[in-house]
Amino acid sequence: MSRLMDLAVEAREVNEPQRLCDMVPYAGLLGIACREVEAGSLLFELPFKDDNVGNTMLPALHGGVIGAFMEHAAVTQLLWNRETTSLPKLIDFSIDYLRPGKPELLFARCRVWRQGSRVANVAVESWQDSERTVATARMHFLLSQPSAVSPESG
Amino acid sequence: MGRRFFEVIPHSQVLGLEVIDAGDQWIEARLPYADHLVGDPDRAILHGGVITTLIDQTSGAAAALSMDPPEVVATLDLRVDHMRAADVRRDVIARASCYRLTRSIAFIRCVAYHDDPEDPLAMSMSSFMRASSSHPSMVEAGS
């Protein structure tokens, strides 16, 4: 297994999901934080900082930053679920922007709709104060499983 | 104009995005490789999210450039298909073009690649709301 996956397993064993964010350079640059809020489910936070702005007039968070935050959330949730033996590979990414991201804390949580042996379908929602949805996204990831010969589940 | 569009965006400066060339309805930009933009610490390849940011910004610039005068735009939706991972320690180029402009919406295509747009890392379709639209809810602050 790769160093990354060793670290992911270790993070799960000591119950510190933040380690999964700390080991990814771009997640650190954006300032992504995460914690487990209920069994198995992670809550992601992106504290506001000037470097993440895309529109200085409003001001508003960069749409790409919001997308990257949500993509990172999905990958981290899959690693946390320990359903893959390597970093999930992004196949496609689709995001709807509902409101501008205000210069304040942004949250995200994931729902893994379906996880087969090779592909995972993940929906991510991001919001700011009092559940105002900023963006919704969905993604497919290619996974690798320990038992590669097992038939597709479901 | 395209260059100025990139220079006034803080996160664009953080990433070091630079405009290579631009026309009336298209723009090409480069994302220079940097260690702090990596997504897989085991291999020095750029985070998928950085590619999303490159595509979002280049597409938004193509939308703005297709208008006379250029307008502020807001992304409504963006879909990116990732054909393959970026190569180790390499820059990525994105070329975006506006293929349809209506009174309210700009429709944009974008391809991300290393050397050859025919060998893409990622391809994207997106739509952007114009600031001059009568329904600029995404563009105004108080939506």
Image (cartoon, helix red, strand yellow):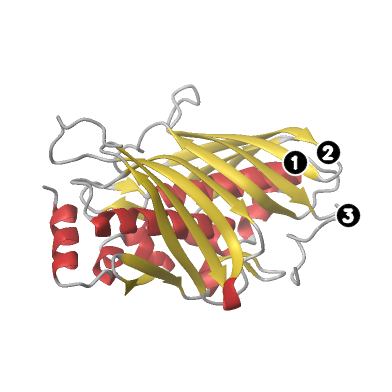
Q: In the picture shown, does residue B36 fall above or below B84? A: below
The picture places residue B125, in percent across and down from the top left corner, at: 60, 36
Disc 2 versus disc 1: distance between alpha carbons?
6 Å
Q: Quadrant of residue B63?
A: top right
Tag 3 subunit: B
- SS state under label 1: strand
Disc 2 versus disc 3: distance between alpha carbons?
12 Å
Q: Residue at x 39, y 66 (%)?
A: A29
Q: Quadrant of residue A82?
A: bottom left
The picture places residue A42, in percent across and down from the top left corner, at: 35, 67
Residue wearing tag 2:
B102
Tag 1 subunit: B
Decide: marks 2, 1 in contact (CB < 8 A)? yes
In the picture, measured across the screen, residue B117 lies left or right of residue A36, that is right
The furthest residue to the front: A154
- SS state under label 2: loop
Residue wearing tag 1:
B106
The quadrant in which the C terminus of chain B is found is: bottom right
Tag 2 subunit: B
Residue wearing tag 3:
B134
